[in-house]
């Protein structure tokens, strides 16, 4: 299974990218593409920009990555209760290529944050909209208090670790 894994943030130290890659690498026999969203440079979406210059090549490249993989593991960064601006802009551009942004691919939807809610507000927004935009949402998992609960070896809290394992199993089933 070819998995595309990314944190929906452009931070070079993204905790969401760490979580997405950790989870994707737990899928048995998966070939994981670790995607850094900072490699995509796009103007802010507007219909005027699209009319004047068309769809940017980086939006097309992101869509091509989605379609060339068997599944997606995305972990959402939460900025003021919503998507990070760079991710939302990329998402908006790709939706102009194809309303089925996620190409009906199986998806494991994650979120985390340093706080106790673990990005739950943005997670709820994505759970409501991503399936309408072509995500075959298999499972979701939110990790609260990232710095207390995560290490490269795994999730410290046994209950949270079990929840993540079940979510990962749902993706690969």
Image (cartoon, rainbow, N blue to C red):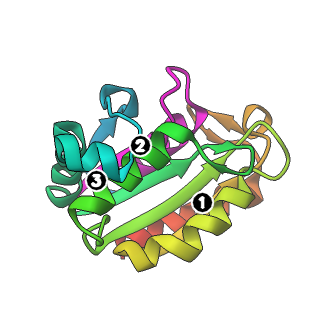
Residue underneath mark 2: 6
Between the C-alphas of marks 1 and 2, the distance is 16 Å
Residue 166 horizontal side relative to residue 170, left or right: right
**Residue visible at 55% across and 22% down?**
13
**Circles 1, 2 touching at the beta carbon (< 8 Å):** no
- The nearer-to-camera label among 3 and 1 is 3
In the displayed structure, does residue 142 sit left or right of residue 74?
Answer: right
Residue found at x 73% / y 59%: 120
x, y (%) of residue 165? 55, 62
Q: Is residue 150 above or below residue 166?
A: above
**Badge nearest the viewer, 1 or 2:** 2
Q: Residue 60 versus residue 110: which sits nearer the camera?
A: 60
Distance in Å between CA atoms under marks 2 and 3: 10 Å
Seen from this angle, which residue lies furthest top?
12
Where is mark 3, residue-wise?
3
Q: Secondary structure at mark 2?
A: strand
Task: Name the mark nearer the viewer: 2 or 3.
Answer: 2
Q: Tell me what residue is drawn at x 74 percent, y 44 percent.
A: 80
Label 1 Cα neighbours within 10 Å, binned few <14 / some 14-19 / many ≥20: many
Residue drawn 17% across the image and 46% down it: 54
Relative placement, left or right, of 3 versus 112 is left
Nearer the N terminus, badge 1 or badge 2?
2
Label 3: which secondary element: strand
Q: What span is in magenta?
A: 1-26
Residue 104 seen from this side: yes
Which is nearer the N-term, disc 3 or disc 1? 3
């Amino acid at each position: 299974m070819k998995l595309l894994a990314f944190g929906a943030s452009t931070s070079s130290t993204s905790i969401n990218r760490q979580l997405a890659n950790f989870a994707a690498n737990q899928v048995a026999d998966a070939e994981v593409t670790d995607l850094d969203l900072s490699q995509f440079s796009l103007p802010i979406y507007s219909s005027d920009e699209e009319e004047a210059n068309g769809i940017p090549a980086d939006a097309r490249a992101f869509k091509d990555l989605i379609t060339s993989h068997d599944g997606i593991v995305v972990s959402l960064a939460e900025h003021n209760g919503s998507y990070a601006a760079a991710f939302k802009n990329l998402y908006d551009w790709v939706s102009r290529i194809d309303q089925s942004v996620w190409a009906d691919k199986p998806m494991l939807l994650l979120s985390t944050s340093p706080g106790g809610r673990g990005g739950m507000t943005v997670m709820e927004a994505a759970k409501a909209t991503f399936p309408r935009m072509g995500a075959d949402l298999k499972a979701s998992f939110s990790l609260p208090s990232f710095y207390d609960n995560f290490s490269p070896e795994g999730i410290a809290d046994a209950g949270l670790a079990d929840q993540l394992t079940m979510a990962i199993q749902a993706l690969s089933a």
